[in-house]
Image (cartoon, rainbow, N blue to C red):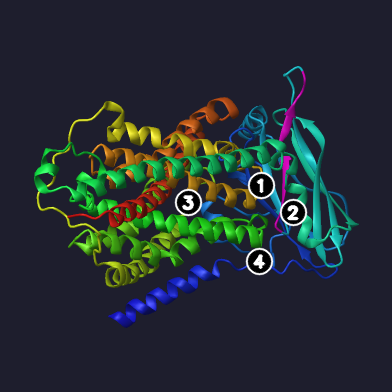
Amino acid sequence: MYRNILRITCVSLAIFCTIRADEHTHTYEDKEEVVLWMNTVGPYHNRQETYNFYSLPFCRGPKTNIGHYHETLGENLQGIELEFSGLEINYKAEVTQKTYCEVELTKEKYQAFLYAVKNHYWYQMYIDDLPIWGIVGEIDEGGDGYYIWTHKKFDIGYNNNQIVDVNLTSEAKVKLTPDIKIAFSYQVQWKPSKIEFKTRFDKYLDPNFFQHRIHWFSIFNSFMMVIFLVGLVSMILMRTLRKDYARYSKDDELDDMERDLGDEYGWKQVHGDVFRPASHSVLFSSLIGSGYHIVSVSLCVITFAIVGDLYMERGSMLSTAIFVYAATAPVNGYAGGGLYSRMGGKRWIKQMVCGAFLVPSLVCGVAFFINFIAIYYHASRAIPFGTMVAVSCICIFVILPLTLVGTLMGRAISGQPNYPCRVNAVPRPIPEKKWFMEPYVIVMLGGILPFGSIFIEMYFIFTSFWAYKIYYVYGFMLLVFLILAVVTVCVTIVCTYFLLNAEDYRWQWTSFLSAASTAFYVYVYSFYYFFFKTKMYGLFQTMWYFGYMALFSLGLGIMCGTLGYVGTSTFVRKIYSTVKID
């Protein structure tokens, strides 16, 4: 049985790793075949509402056979549908204007093209992994005439035996009229170029946008916020704690009668309950384990993006993220399983399964819901059934076993509780306190400063994803990630100190949720961005936007909540291990 499980796991890993293979080496001999892939078509303002290129009544070229083809898991999940154009293009071989097909505009085809032109449809193609965009047609200034572009002129730049530049010029517009024949033609010109292969994607980047002074200023502003906040937290806590330590040391010198008559208050009074296990420990430890997992994946993917320029390959970012997520599953099991064991949990298998499938189930649930809408719309974003099976196999045969390994290691290595204070058998009553010291108020206020530290970066990330700008400044992202971590930890420590000083020992969930509330503000900001910064419309695009923004916010919340809890836990253990407790 174990041999069969191992065999299935190895096969799944092998299949999963091979999806990263490229379709060719990007080198050509003279007259060698160059493939023009037709990808998707859709409305310009709804970038995620894409359809198969040939869902419009375009015609194919006469060529039917090609020498290579590839499709990765990341491409399938992103709705990339590459279909051969049928146009014959050979390396360094000029093609003069050549008609490759004709389309007779029946009533149905006329209405399809008319709808596409009215809604500003555009399409995407690929040559040697270089994206090319074109417009289906245009409307004349009066708004009465609708025209379609019928000629594609390709200017391809080459450097030695590699393609380094592709430009498309749409020409020969024809007015849409029922019952006419439209001839489609193409032309290919090859030009030597001094562009190096490693820099051929630079033309698609937008340094004026991403490296604008506002971007640099936001990073500097966030960095100054970190310095100020860390200094403020250190000053307040050190001065306050010094007074607390002095007061508690004086209390230790008093006899029992004097201590009983004294006015005791503050965080020391809950030392017997502060290390009490959090309520709903299975869910809590699963969230913390998932948070560790997301932090690990984020750091790895950002590092790979900085080193490897993942934006140059279709779907490579998503494929890398899935691979890293599966490979780092033991982190989830180790952190969640160890924490659950320290809390005295007995149902560790339930916790392990919950931790392994918490994030994947949420992602798959939202994705499959949106997938039904995509299928209804016949959109290319619909995930194929085979891809669903592949993702399910990765979760069952890769993520779950690796999480099990991590859980066993976590229980064995870090599963023993070593709290500095003994936990009382009976919980201490929580005294009444002012409204602004209630946990729900602390939770809502805790995410404001962390959100402020990443507010500007959110705009650039949203614009890169929803407006199809290529995000390439991953050094900025790494710096913002570190700033967010520091600000989150500082804020949650302050919140927890005030909570404990009010003799409320429910700090575990409060520290997690106060940091996770950053995601709430990010999701609220996504509403502003949708209504005021985009021109998106329609059910499909709206559900796609808010569905995946909810997933993004949820993942950010779990990550920030984990950072807040880990920092606060270290702080709590430190202060209670310093004070002498009778």
Distance from Cα at disc 4 to Cα at disc 1? 22 Å
- Check whether the beta carbons of the residues at disc 1 and disc 2 lie within 8 A of each other: yes
Other-residue count near label 2 (Cα within 10 Å), few / some / many at <14 / 14–19 / ≥20: some
Count of number-bearing discs: 4
Distance from Cα at disc 2 to Cα at disc 4? 18 Å
**Relative to the observer, which residue lies in front, 78 or 227?**
227
Distance from Cα at disc 4 to Cα at disc 3? 21 Å
Q: Secondary structure at mark 2?
A: helix
Q: Is residue 1 left or right of residue 29?
A: left
Q: Position of residue 496 (x, y in %)?
A: 33, 42
Going from N to C along the chain, the mark reached first, 1 or 2, is 2
Q: Is residue 270 visible?
A: yes
Residue 133 among magenta residues: yes
Q: Secondary structure at mark 1?
A: loop
Name the residue beneath numbered marker 1: 470
Residue type highlighted by circle 2 = Phe
Name the residue beneath numbered marker 4: 23
User: Residue pushed farthest bottom?
Assistant: 3
Q: Is residue 516 left or right of residue 179?
A: left
Please report the residue visible at 33 percent of the width from the left and 57 percent of the height from the top: 357
Residue type highlighted by circle 1 = Ile
**Relative to the observer, which residue lies in front, 27 or 198?**
198
Name the residue beneath numbered marker 2: 201
Distance from Cα at disc 2 to Cα at disc 3? 28 Å
Residue 377 among magenta residues: no
Name the residue beneath numbered marker 3: 383
